[in-house]
Amino acid sequence: MEIEYGQLEGETCKRMGCQGVIEEHPRENCSCHISPPCHYCTTPREYCPDCGWEAKDDMVINDCVVNVNKETGTYRTWTPRPLDETKIDWHSKSHSSCSMIKEGCYPLGTTIEEVRKVVDGTFGGSFESFGGGKFKFIAYTD
């Protein structure tokens, strides 16, 4: 079972077992009235007062969202990035020495051929599942 970490104000943090509640820094120095959207309003403001997690410190590394504890240099969390359901999007996973799994989502109404065009391996591949906006594809790479 995959742990869902808190991201929004009012949710439980759950990072490294933390039971703190996510809060949001107040808006300050907003200049949207001059040139929207301003940097301050597009920078994540969520944080956990118990463990020190800050959303603005999250970064994407190898298809995962990573947050580093600034004091110790250790990873606080390492979770797959959320998939964008408004486009064909997937996570790549290892499968064998000559294939990989591409598991993801697509907007409803997208055909299986449209998804195949973007996920096909060098030597083709096959769908293990496809439907309801989700797919699992084995791409042959070698």
Image (cartoon, rainbow, N blue to C red):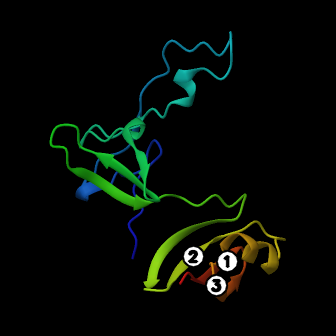
Q: Is residue 14 visible?
A: no
- Under mark 2, the amino acid is Lys
Numbered circle sitting on residue 120: 1
Q: Are marks 3 and 2 in contact (CB under 8 Å)?
A: no
Task: Check disc 3 and give the amino acid type.
Answer: Phe
Under circle 3, the secondary element is loop
Say which quadrant the N terminus sits in.
Answer: bottom left
Q: Residue at x 28, y 45 (%)?
A: 68
| Residue annotated with mark 3 | 123
Residue at (75, 73) in percent of width and height: 117
63 relative to 141 in the view: left or right: left
Identify the secondary structure beneath mark 2: strand
Residue contact at pointers 1 and 3, CB within 8 angstroms: no
> Residue sitting at 48 percent across and 15 percent down?
28
Mark in the foreground, 1 or 3: 3
The residue depicted at 52 percent of the width and 22 percent of the height is 40
Q: Is residue 1 left or right of residue 112?
A: left
Quickly name the residue at label 2.
102
User: Cα distance, mark 1 to mark 3?
Assistant: 8 Å
Q: Nearer the viewer, residue 46 or 67?
A: 67
Q: Nearer the viewer, residue 15 or 137?
A: 137
Question: Would you call the spot at circle 3 few (<14 residues within 10 Å), some (14-19), or many (20 or more)?
Answer: few
Q: Element type at marker 1?
A: loop
Tell me residue 129's x, y (percent). Answer: 65, 87
